[in-house]
Structures are given as structure tokens and as C-alpha cells.
Amino acid sequence: MIDLNASHLSRVLRGADRTRPSVDLIRRIAEALDLPAGYFPELREAAVIERLKADAALRDKLYTQLGTNRDR
């Protein structure tokens, strides 16, 4: 259903060679299982990062709100 090689899936599930699922793979799994778009935290994280990359003002506002711009 998700067009995935069984050996690749096995490596991802075992974390072999630090293999992590791509956002695309996670999205395909969610769709195949009829889960909501934001079911997996990796998809929510990818959506946030994508939005921040596309909106510099939002990125800067969040950076300021997080207080990460303080001198150390």
C-alpha cells in the first residue's frame, strides 16, 4: 500500500545504520492507515519547519518569544 521495500522498512524499524523514516514515508503510512495528517509527531514537526522556512517574520517572532536570542 505504501510502495516500500521490505528490507528498507526493516532497517527503519530497527534503526539500523541510523536509518530514519523520511517525512514522505511517514505521510504515506498515515494515509495508508487512514490516520489524521498530524497523527505522527514527525509530520507535525515537518509542517512547522516548512512554515518557518517560508515565513521569515514568523521565524523571527518565534525566536524572540522563545527567548533564545539572549547573550550567553
Image (cartoon, grey):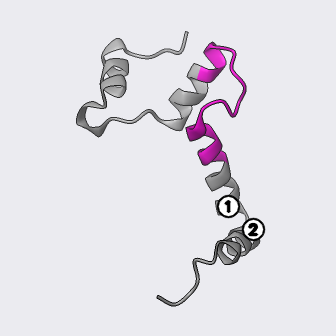
5 or 12, nearer to the observer = 12
Query: Pointer 1 and pointer 2: residues touching (CB < 8 Å)?
Result: yes
Q: Which mark is residue 58?
A: 2
Label 1, residues with CA under 10 Å away: few <14, some 14-19, many ≥20: some
**Residue at position x 60%, y 47% in the image:** 45
Q: Residue 55: x, y in percent?
A: 73, 65
> SS class of the residue under badge 1?
helix
Left or right of residue 40: residue 9? left
Which contiguous range is marked in magenta? 30-47
In the image, 24 versus 72, the foreground residue is 72
Horizontal and vertical percent position of residue 61: 74, 74
Q: Name the residue under label 1.
A: 52
Name, please, the residue furthest toward the top: 1
Q: Is residue 71 above or below residue 18?
A: below
Residue 43 among magenta residues: yes
- Mark 2: which secondary structure? helix
Among the 4 quarters of the image, the one containing residue 9: top left
How many residues crowd mark 2 within 10 Å: few (<14), some (14–19), many (20+)? few
Q: In which quarter of the image is the N terminus?
A: top right
14 drawn magenta = no
On screen, residue 27 versus residue 21, left or right, reads: right
The amino acid at mark 2 is Leu
Q: Residue 72 location, x and y as percent?
A: 46, 88
Residue at left offset 75%, top offset 73%: 57
